[in-house]
Image (cartoon, grey):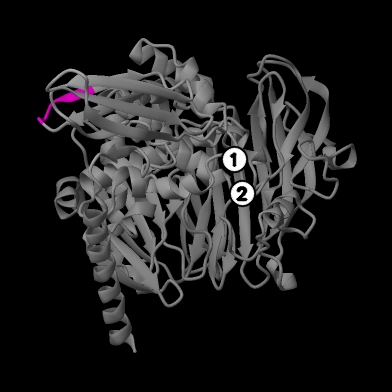
Amino acid sequence: MGALVAAVLHITSPVSAQPPAAAAPPPTGPAALQAVSMRTANYDIDVTLDPSTRTITGIELITWHNQGLVAAYSIRLHLYWNAFRDRKSTWLRQRRLAGDDPFASADPNDFGYSDVTKIIVVNPDGSDGVDLLKTDFRAISPDDQNADDRTLYAASLDPAIQPGKTLRLRVEWKGKFPRNFDRTGVIGNYFFVSQWFPKLGVFNAGWTAHQFFANSEFFSDFGNYDVRMTVPKGWIVGATGVEQSRTDSGNQTTHRYTQTDVHDFAWTTSPDFIEKRQQFDMPGRAPVQMRLLIQPEHEYLADRHFAGTAAALQYYGTWYGAYPYPQLTIVDPPWQSESGGMEYPTIFTGGTRWLSPRYTNDPEYVVLHEAGHQFWYGLVANNEVEHAWLDEGINEYSDSRVQWEALQPNYLVQRFFGDFIPWQFTDIRLQRATDTNYMNTYRRAPDRDSMSTPTAVLWPGTHQNMSYHKAALMLHTLERMYTWEVMQKTLSIFFTRWKYKHPTPQDFFAALDEVTGKDHKWFIDQVYNSSNRFDYSVDQLSTEPSDVSGQFHTTVVVRRLEAGQFPVDVLVTFENGEQAREKWNGQGRWAVFTYDKPSKAVSAQIDPERVLLLDTSYTNNSRTTAPAADRAATKWSLRWMVWLQDLLMTWAFLV
C-alpha cells in the first residue's frame, strides 16, 4: 500500500477550518459553456441548516430542458425524506417485510419529512406564473399503490413543455432530518445531507420516477449545480463539487459549491471534522484534490483513506477512463452513524472502525468501493432503481480486482465483543472469488430472485446478493471464460460509450458481444434472466482391469444437480500422469465418459479451473479412486486448532 500511495500522491498538511487563501473562481468563458453531458436538469439552491431543530429550509430554481421524444404534460418530483415521515411509507414497509424495523422503538424526533410550501412555474420573462401547489400537486404511488406513501409527487402542466423547450420551477420547502441511518440524517452534531432537495424524475417518452424503496437507490438526469449552504459559523462543510466562496453573516457562514455535469448533490457538515488534503497525480491526467473530513478518533487512519481513494482513481482510471472532476471528498462518519458506505457525485462516505489492523483492507475496502462508484454510478449513470447491478456488481467486481492487485496482503480479521475487538489471522489471506466477491454469502440464497428482476421489487434482503455478489461472480465467470483483457476492454468500451448517459443491461451485453464476437443469449438466459441454481458433480469414478491384457477400463459419471445449465470441462487424471479433458455442454442431467488405458484413473474433476463461480457447491466437483479422508481431516483439524489457539489467546489477553 505504501508504494502505491508514494507513487501517486502529493501529501499536504492538515487543512484548518478557515477558507483557502484563494478559492477557485466559478468557471467562466468557453470552458464553462463546454458541456459533456446533456445538462437536462439544473439546480440553483439556497439552503439554511438549523441544528437546534434538525431542519433545513430551502429555495431552488430548477431549469429543466425537455430532451425527450414527446411533450411533458406533467412533472414528477421526488421528496425522499417522506420515507421517514411515519411508519406507513413504502420504504419502511419493505424494511419490515425483511424483518428489519429501524423505527421499532423510535423517538418522535427520529422521524423526518420534506414539505413543499411553494412550487411556482416561472414565466419566460422571469415573472411568477402558476403555483402548482394550488392546482393539483399531489402524492402518487404508481409502483405499489400505497396511498400513505408520500415520496413521489406529480402536478399537471398547462401548457405542456414541448420537446426542445425549457421549464423553470421555483420550489420552496422545509425538511426535517431523520435519525442518521441508511444514507442520510443526523447523529449528534454530524449531519449528512442526501436526497434532501425536491428533485425531478427522468423524462424521455414519459416519466421514469419511482417511489422510494428500501432496496433501491436513485436515478436522475445530469446537469449543473450551484448550491449555497448556510450553517453555523466554524462548522466544516463538504459537498459535491468545489467550494467557490465562504461568506460570514453574524454567527453563520454560507458556503457556495458548484459542479457541472453531475446528476445529484450531497453535502455534510459538523464542527468535529478534521480536514486533510492530498493530491492525486497521474501522467497525462489532470490532478485530483482528495479532501478528507475525518473524525478526530480516526485521524491516524487518514493515510489509509487516501490509499483506498487513490487506488480507485489509478486503477479504474487506467482500466476504464479518467475521473474528470477536480476534487473528490471523503467523509468519515462518526461511531453509530449508519450513513457510511454511500456514494454521491464527487463525495462519498467511508466506513471506519477505531481498531483497524494493518494489512487488512478495512477501511480501504469501503473507501475503494465508494470511490469506484464515481465511475460506476457517478459517470455511467444507469437506473439504480431498476438495474442496480450495472453499478454495484461492476463496481464490486472491479474493486475486488484492485484489492487483489494493489492492496496486499489482505488478511482475514474476525471481530469479537460486539464486533469491536479485531483478531487478525496472518495465515489466511482473503481470496478474490470466494471472499471479496462474497461467494459464500451468495450461496446461502442464490435463487430468491433473478438478476433481471427490477431492483426495487427484489425480495427484501436479496438486493445485495443479486446486485452485488451474483453480478460480480457473473462478471468474474466471464473473465475466466475469456480473459481479464477481454473483460477490461468490454468494460472500457461500455464506460466510454455510456458515460454521462443512462445505459441499460442490454447495452452492457451488446458491448460484451461486440468485443468477443459471440452471441451471449444462452448465458443471459441462464445466469441473468433465471433464478436457477448451478451445481455440477462427479457422481462416479471407477477403474478396473479390462478384458484387454494390461489395460484398465475407467468410467466417469458426471451430473447436473440443479436447473442451471452451463458448459463445463471434465478432467480425468491417470496414475502415469496422463490426463484426458472432455467438454460437456452441461445441458443434460448426466453424462458418461469411458476410457481404456494402460494406467488406472486416480481422479476426476468437473470444471477443474473453476470457471463457473456460480456453482453452489465445490465439494462435489471432484472424486478420487483412493480415499483422502485422512489427509483432509488432518488439514482441517490443524486449521481449526490454529483458530482455537488464536481465540483462546485473545480471550486470555482480554480477561
Image location of residue 393, percent across then percent down: 45, 37
Q: Quadrant of residue 141?
A: top right
Q: Which contiguous range is marked in magenta?
A: 576-580
In terms of secondary structure, where does tag 2 sit?
Answer: loop
* Viewer-closest of 81 and 454: 454
Q: Residue at x 77, y 34 (%)?
A: 121
Q: Amino acid at mark 1?
A: Phe
In terms of secondary structure, where does tag 1 sit?
Answer: loop
Q: Are marks 1 and 2 in contact (CB under 8 Å)?
A: yes
Which residue is the site of mark 2?
195
Is 578 part of what is drawn in magenta?
A: yes
* Viewer-closest of 598 and 465: 598
Image location of residue 610, percent across then percent down: 31, 34
Image location of residue 429, percent across then percent down: 24, 55
Which secondary structure type mostly characterizes the magenta part of the structure? loop
Q: Residue at x 67, y 39 (%)?
A: 457
Q: Amino acid at mark 2?
A: Gln
107 vs 618: above or below: below
Is 457 part of what is drawn in magenta?
A: no
Q: Residue furthest left?
A: 576
Numbered tag placed on residue 614 in the rendering: none
- The 10 Å Cα crowd at callout 1, few under 14, some 14 to 19, many 20 or more, is many
Q: Is residue 253 left or right of residue 130?
A: left
Q: Quadrant of the C terminus?
A: bottom left
Label 1, label 2: how many angstroms apart (C-alpha)?
A: 9 Å
Which residue is the site of mark 1?
218
Which mark is in front, 1 or 2?
Answer: 1
329 vs 226: above or below: below
Q: Is residue 615 left or right of residue 4?
A: right
Can the viewer see residue 331?
yes
Can the viewer see residue 377?
no
